[in-house]
Amino acid sequence: MSGKPLIRLDHINLPANRPEWLADWYAEQFGFTAHKGFVSGPGTLLVFEQGEPSDYRGNVHFGFRCESRQQVQEWATRFNEVLEEERTYSGFKTKDPEGNVFEVYWEK
């Protein structure tokens, strides 16, 4: 093998005031499974542990990628958000109940 080995993001671990409650919120919103602060779904693992949520500034966030513009529009409607639209991008950013910023997007 030449070059760098393949690597992929496996999980995100975030502090939360109410880890199990926030995991349940993500499970309910996105159809994932929650168990004791862990949230899992296809290609997704979020881990919440007891701690003070980060003070997000600038462009700090994590993203959920969709397969189509239409899917992003459906999520935007669900979260009552306005889409940012470009020729090869459609998406929005919003916050969970503890202030973590996440993006839902499609990109060509």
Image (spheres, grey):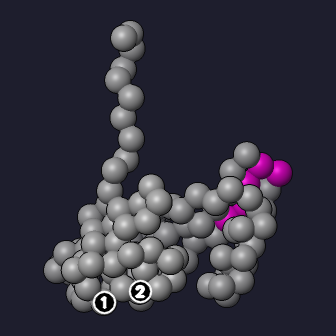
Image-based side of 13 in relation to 89, left or right: left
Secondary structure mostly taken by the magenta-highlighted segment of the chain = strand
Give the percent coordinates (x, y) of residue 3.
39, 14
**How far is mark 1 from mark 2, CA to CA?**
6 Å
Q: Which one is in front, 78 or 60?
A: 78
The residue sitting at 68% across, 56% down in the picture is: 67
Give the percent coordinates (x, y) of residue 38.
28, 72
Residue 99 falls inside the magenta stretch: no
Q: Amino acid at mark 2?
A: Trp
Give the percent coordinates (x, y) of residue 63.
51, 61
Picture disc at residue 25: 2
Quadrant in which the N terminus is drawn:
top left
Picture disc at residue 91: none
Q: Looking at the image, which residue sits at the far right?
A: 87
- Tag 1 and tag 2, C-beta contact below 8 Å: yes
Q: Say few, some or many: other residues with alpha carbon within 10 Å of mark 1 (under 14 / 14 to 19 / 20 or more).
A: some
